[in-house]
Image: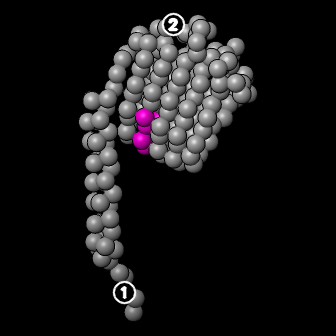
């Protein structure tokens, strides 16, 4: 005689974990949305831009040739920053990135020199086309990154 077990007991045991996981995701998304309302600064024509984002995607294409500073905070999100519309900056652009479980793509003109300092768990890399410099002051783009379980890709566009 063969008896089949009902999946109902297993589902009942998993239900608190699933509800907890979705509740956690909702709390993080709500906290990110409230923080972004308070901390987002500037638009694509500003000289200084800051974006805070969770559970979403960021597409940023600055247009101001006087842009000097970008700051991006990402949590469980992805982003793309396209700097190819900008001329060669006179004093360079500082990009500060803080992210957890996130990814960011940065596209720069092929003739720009890029410098970076990366701390955390994850990585940063290029497609080989942008020039990497070890002199922070000679760079056209300076990336300061603190990352937990994420990565940054720098590519020529």
Q: Residue at x 40, y 88 (%)?
A: 2
Position of residue 84 relative to residue 70, above or below, is: above
Per the image, the residue denoted by label 1 is 3
Q: Residue at x 62, y 17 (%)?
A: 140
Q: Tell me the tag on residue 29.
A: none
**Quadrant (top left, top right, bottom left, bottom right) of the N terminus:** bottom left
> Measured from the top left, where is residue 135 in percent x and y?
70, 24
Q: Is residue 69 magenta?
A: no
> Measured from the top left, where is residue 68 in percent x and y?
50, 15
In terms of secondary structure, where does tag 2 sit? loop
Q: Residues within 10 Å of mark 1 (few under 14, many from 20)?
A: few
Is residue 53 visible from the viewing direction of this image?
A: yes
Is residue 108 visible from the viewing direction of this image?
A: no
Q: Residue at x 67, y 18 (%)?
A: 138
Nearest the eye: 82 or 122: 122
Nearest the eye: 114 or 18: 114
Q: Residue at x 58, y 35 (%)?
A: 152
Per the image, the residue denoted by label 2 is 65
Magenta segment range? Answer: 73-78
Q: CA distance from mark 2 to mark 1?
A: 73 Å
Position of residue 62 relative to residue 134, above or below, is: above
> Measured from the top left, where is residue 148 in percent x and y?
51, 47
> From the viewer's perspective, is the residue at label 2 or at label 1 nearer?
2
Q: How is the image coloured?
A: one colour
């Amino acid at each position: 005689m063969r008896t089949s077990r009902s999946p109902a007991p297993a589902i009942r045991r998993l239900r608190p974990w699933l509800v907890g996981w979705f509740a956690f995701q909702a709390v993080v998304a709500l906290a990110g949305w409230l923080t972004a309302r308070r901390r987002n600064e500037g638009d694509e024509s500003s000289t200084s831009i800051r974006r805070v984002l969770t559970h979403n995607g960021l597409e940023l294409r600055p247009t101001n040739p006087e842009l000097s500073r970008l700051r991006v905070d990402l949590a469980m999100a992805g982003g793309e920053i396209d700097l190819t519309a900008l001329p060669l900056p006179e004093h360079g652009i500082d990009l500060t990135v803080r992210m957890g479980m996130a990814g960011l793509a940065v596209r720069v003109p092929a003739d720009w020199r890029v410098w970076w300092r990366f701390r955390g768990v994850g990585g940063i890399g290029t497609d080989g086309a942008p020039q990497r410099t070890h002199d922070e002051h000679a760079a056209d783009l300076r990336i300061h990154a603190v990352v937990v379980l994420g990565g940054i890709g720098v590519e020529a566009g």
